Amino acid sequence: MSNLALTTILDPCYSRQWRSCCKLWTASLLRHQWEGRIHIERNFSQLLFPVSRTDLHEVEFVPNLGGAQTKEVNWMTLAREHQLEAAGMMAGAEAFEWILFADADCVATQNVDHLFVGDCDLLVSSARGLPDPGFVAVRGELMQKFVSSLRFAGGLTGSGLATIMKSGEWKVREYERGEVLRPDDPDVSLSDLANAAVIHFSGMKAADKYRLAFAFHMMAVYGDRDGLFFDMIEA
């Protein structure tokens, strides 16, 4: 069985920052040979990847703003709400070993398949004392239960995840130390981030997320020790 990565991207009108983040996140998975499928839900018509890629699926949707003005919308909250809704309507989830819920502002710096192992139901990492809703994985056979439980617990949020984890109904394991990090984690250095498998750029402005995600992606893919890529672009 393979794994499935789910990401929802919501860009405010006339903005491209979040879609740029999502393209980096997806490209980093593909570049590091993600062993599974990738499913992206986006609120704009343009394809992130006009050239088709095996096991990459993009779907356009129209977000329900509930009558709110664009400037009043919490886009991250709305994206996670839609992500949970879309997951609940997805058929065939049990065919996947793990289903990863990932925010668009993540980037993989290496192959991440080794993260999804172990005899457990949920894989999480902690952010500021709560489980990080921006990078959490659930067994495919338990996804519908996961979605239903989170709906009653307040949604795909840190507190929602903490609530269902405290219920005692889930076997939970944290990713190995240092594998999934955020720049604002306590005592995390640049070296720690560079050695992590996944960096989640939460708690930052959208423009800063993209710039840093781009830097770490380029470093991971093209930052060879001999400087060959730099020599090529500077020739």
Image (cartoon, rainbow, N blue to C red):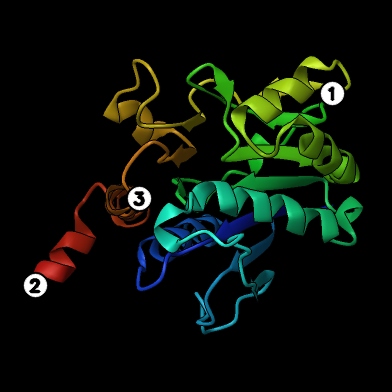
Residue closest to the eye, 172 or 157: 157
- Which corner quadrant of the image does residue 115 belong to? top right
Q: Nearer the viewer, mark 3 or mark 1?
A: 1
Question: Which tag, 3 or 1, sits closer to the chain's start?
Answer: 1
Residue at mark 2:
235
Determine the CA span between mark 1 and mark 2: 55 Å
Question: Which tag, 1 or 2, sits closer to the chain's start?
Answer: 1
Q: Is residue 143 left or right of residue 225?
A: right
- Vertical order, 137 against 32 (above or below): above
Look at the numbered disc 2 and give the secondary structure of its residue. Answer: loop
Residue visible at 59% across and 58% down in the picture? 8
- Vertical order, 129 against 158 (above or below): above
Name the outermost residue toward the front.
67
Looking at the rendered structure, the kind of residue marked 1 is Trp
Within-10-Å neighbours for mark 1: few <14, some 14–19, many 20+: some
Residue at mark 3:
213
Residue visible at 58% across and 54% down in the picture? 79
Residue closest to the eye, 219 or 91: 91
- Which corner quadrant of the image does residue 235 belong to? bottom left
Looking at the rendered structure, the kind of residue marked 2 is Ala
Look at the numbered disc 1 and give the secondary structure of its residue. Answer: loop
Residue at mark 1:
170
- Which corner quadrant of the image does residue 158 belong to? top right
